[in-house]
Image (cartoon, rainbow, N blue to C red):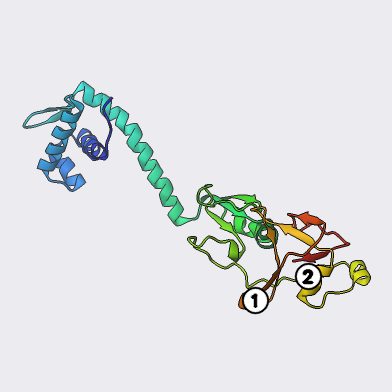
Amino acid sequence: MRHFDRSDLADLNVFLAIARYGSFRQTAINLNLTTSAVSHAMRRLENRLDVRLLHRTSRSVALTAAGDDLSKALHVGFDAIANGLLAIEGHRKEPSGRLRLNVSKDAGRLLLACVWEDFLARFPLIHLDITVEDRLTDIVESGYDAGIRFLDRVPQDMIAVPLTKPLRWVVAGAPEYLNRHGRPLKPADIYQHRCVQMRIGDNSIYPWEFGDRDEMIRIEGPGPLRLNDTQMVIAPFLVGH
């Protein structure tokens, strides 16, 4: 079987135009080519296919039997290409198609749950496909269009746009726990408490962070419980969030 290459596509388009107009001259006008270029394209195509596609005289052009078969087959393919281009035109006029997002549980709950209904009402031709997980998935390799991550979890080669102001993390505890064990007043006091350890998507433990930038202190709070879902509320523990 003969290998198909890109030059064939241009020559096949010339052939279809000749079949449509029945004239090298008219084909040249409609394709913005010279008559000699149209003639050369046909000779090149027939030589590569090793079959005559046109009967030519000084006054007329007609399809051979092979040319007629090829013309009918090509109409199907070129119509499909035309329909595909029309579909793309629709994308330019109004957003449409499937939008695949990969987001963390916190992002899904805090950012998307409150806006996706309004988003779909505004863009009715968009189909949202949202995967919610804390596993650090490679967005590009896994075929997602975008993702939502905490800033320090965004790869340096990715384009990032902030969706919120800087987040402020707090330490929380049930009143019963704080009445029994006292309130921590400084970061070092955390070591004297029963803490919930948070496991993130890559199975590492997310440290409790106090302060900012160079002054930041990171502490892996001690405790007998480790979770990967911040929605679980455990009364007899401190929670860093």
Q: Position of residue 220 (x, y in %)?
A: 73, 64
Observer-nearest of 234 and 217: 217
Report the residue at 33% width, 37% height from top: 78
Q: What crowding class fits label 2: few (fewer than 14 Cα within 10 Å), some (14-19), or many (20 or more)? A: some
Observer-nearest of 20 and 230: 230
Left/right of residue 6 with respect to residue 233 in the rendered view? left
Report the residue at 16% width, 37% height from top: 41
Quadrant location of residue 109? bottom right
Amino acid type of disc 1? Asp
Amino acid type of disc 2? Val
Q: Position of residue 228 (x, y in %)?
A: 73, 54
Give the SS element for disc 1: loop
Q: What crowding class fits label 1: few (fewer than 14 Cα within 10 Å), some (14-19), or many (20 or more)? A: few
According to the picture, the residue beneath numbered tag 2 turns out to be 171
Observer-nearest of 224 and 172: 224
- Above or below, 70 relative to 176: above
- Above or below, 225 relative to 30: below
Q: What distance separates the C-alpha of mark 2 from that of mark 1?
A: 15 Å
Q: Position of residue 171 (x, y in %)?
A: 78, 70
Report the residue at 67% width, 53% height from top: 203
Going by the picture, which residue comes out furthest to the left? Answer: 58
Observer-nearest of 198 and 139: 198
- Above or below, 192 relative to 141: below
The number of numbered badges drawn on the structure is 2
* Quadrant assignment for the N terminus: top left
Name the N-terminal-most of marks 2 and 1.
Answer: 2
According to the picture, the residue beneath numbered tag 1 turns out to be 212
Going by the picture, which residue comes out furthest to the top? Answer: 65
Left/right of residue 234 with respect to residue 88 in the rendered view? right
* Quadrant assignment for the C terminus: bottom right
Left/right of residue 103 with respect to residue 208 in the rendered view? left
Instruction: Mark 2 and mark 1 in contact? Answer it, CB < 8 Å.
Output: no
